[in-house]
Amino acid sequence: MLLVHARATGVLPDEFRPRIFTSKLPFSMHTFLLDGAVAGAWRYENGRIELQPFRRLTRAERSELKEEGERLAAFHA
């Protein structure tokens, strides 16, 4: 989705675009959405999902992401 739409600002806020599309990262970056918009990146490492949020997350958002991350880690295992 991020690659198909050149200006998908509804999904990828302009302020986060340089973090995802750079010449230093030629490979795809795994991103997560909050309320339908990119809010950070993730990676699977040592049996866990590691998050790199692009903005400050609320306690509720962190809780939801933790639960989803546990399900995703189980899927990868």
Image (cartoon, grey):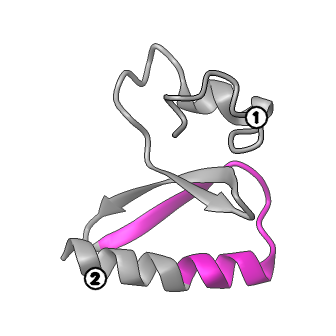
User: Which residue was labeled with disc 2?
Assistant: 74
User: Which residue was labeled with disc 1?
Assistant: 9
Residue that appears at 40% across and 68% down: 49
Q: Nearer the viewer, residue 8 or 30?
A: 8
Quadrant in the rendering for residue 73: bottom left
What amino acid is labelled 2 in the image?
Answer: Ala
Q: Which x, y percent locates residue 72?
A: 36, 75
Disc on res. 47: none
Q: Which x, y percent locates residue 61?
A: 72, 76
Residue range (magenta): 48-66
What amino acid is labelled 1 in the image?
Answer: Thr
Q: Nearer the viewer, residue 4 or 54?
A: 4
Left or right of 15? Residue 34 is left
Picture quarter with the C terminus: bottom left
Secondary structure category for the residue under label 1: loop
Badge 1 local density, few (<14 within 10 Å), some, or many (20+)? some
Residue that appears at 69% across and 48% down: 54
